[in-house]
Amino acid sequence: MSGARTEEKGFYGVYGGSIVPPELQEALNHLEEAFEKYKDDEEFNKEYKYYLKEYVGRENPLTFARNLTEKLGGAKIYLKREDLNHMGAHKVNNVLGQILLAKRMGAKRVIAETGAGQHGVATATVCAMFGMECVVYMGLEDTKRQALNVFRMEMLGAKVVAVAQGQGKLKDAVDEALNDFVANYKNTFYLLGSAVGPHPYPAIVKHFQSIISEESKRQILEKEGRLPDAVIACVGGGSNAIGAFAHYIDEPSVRLIGVEPDQAATMAEGVPAIIHGFKTLTLLDDDGNPKPVYSIAAGLDYPGVGPEHSYLKEIGRAEYYTVTNDEVLDAFQTLSKTEGIIPALESSHAVAYALKLAPQLKPDQIIIVNISGRGDKDVEHVFKLLKERN
């Protein structure tokens, strides 16, 4: 697997970098040093793989969606089942890798940000297992939408800080987490949940999430004897998508398709700008500040995107599309009713695009849809949304 990183450290084309205060740069340099030391270390990877198997439950299946395929006609649809991971999402892949780094760096306190709550729950889970203090920043609005995940985090021993500033959403949670990290970096490990932020975070998150495509590539070759024609994943910050794409980036026959909410269409409408210490495509308001965004999926409420996604779009290697809230709700119900798999609202964005793409393709073509998380956390929210819609 090769990345899209250029020779200049931390950049993907013109995107990425580390635009932060000197004291934070010192902490990031320390983190990069540890990551470079351990990512290929035999003992580190042995421990990481042990926990992936014994704690997370990997490898998870690549499930042929027979009923959905027959219902739609066209391409065969396979589902990469990140929803079957411990705690129900892809987030734990990255969290586990980073907590093992934190342990080796001697950190006693871990902080994180979360939108939908899945990253926060995953962080609280591993902190409980490794006996570390855990503080999770979450937008006030998101704590209301995802009250069950807030309770889960607290039950696991984490302190959840509701951030009321701004819109009270994911961007604001990231702001507060970064402020904490600047103030406390000497004894605190910032466990960032998406493929965003200053270098080395996008590289770290991609490295640990690439297990998704490492497995799916091997699995599809075993099942079909060839690579898929397309891989589809939802995109907010972009961690599940970059993980789902990673081992296919150097396979030009495979289309890489990211799917966003139409009210948070960073890839479609964003412009290059600096947000949270890195340069990427960003939605800006008339004053040049990050624009308020909305998605029925709290995990996709982010006005920027991981820098490698911006680069992949710029060079034409990946495609990015939007879907509407109604299409997402329909996809949520369709997958539930045809396959008995309730997807997270985030993942339902990818499903929604697959429902449109599959009938346009031939029966001998193959689509892999990354089911980044399960929808238990969203059922009450969807119930209210459907009631309002009807």
Image (cartoon, rainbow, N blue to C red):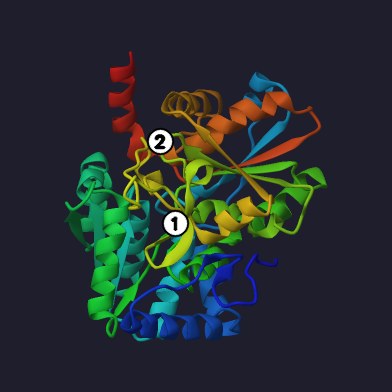
Residue 124 in view of the camera: no
Count of all numbered marks drawn on residues in the image:
2
Q: Is residue 376 visible?
A: yes
In the rendered structure, which disc, 2 or 1, sits on the residue that comes first in sequence?
A: 1
Residue that mark 2 sits on: 263
Give me the residue at 37% from left, 75% from top. 20
Q: Mark 1 = which residue?
A: 91
Circle 2 — which element?
loop
* 376 left or right, relative to 77: left
Looking at the picture, tell me which residue is in the foreground, 140 or 211: 140
* Amino acid on which disc 2 is placed: Gln
Q: Nearer the viewer, residue 23 or 134?
A: 23
From this view, report whether residue 15 is shown above or below residue 28: above
Image location of residue 276, percent across then percent down: 37, 64
Amino acid type of the residue that numbered disc 1 sits on in the rendered structure = Lys
Q: Is residue 302 left or right of residue 234?
A: left
Please name which of the two marks, 2 or 1, marks the residue nearer to the observer.
2
Q: Would you call the spot at circle 1 few (<14 residues within 10 Å), some (14-19), or many (20 or more)?
A: many
Left or right relative to 320: residue 278 = left
Residue sitting at x 37%, y 68%: 191
Residue drawn 52% across the image and 35% down it: 322
Q: Crowding at label 2, few (<14), some or many (≥20) Cα neighbours within 10 Å?
A: some
The Cα–Cα distance between marks 2 and 1, rounded to whole angstroms, is 23 Å
Q: In which quarter of the image is the C terminus?
A: top left
Give the percent coordinates (x, y) of residue 296.
36, 35
Left or right relative to 245: residue 90: left
**Between 19 and 377, which is closer to the camera in this rendering?**
19
Q: Is mark 1 on a helix, strand or loop?
A: helix
Question: Camera-side residue: 25 or 387?
Answer: 25
**Quarter of the N terminus within the rendering:** bottom right
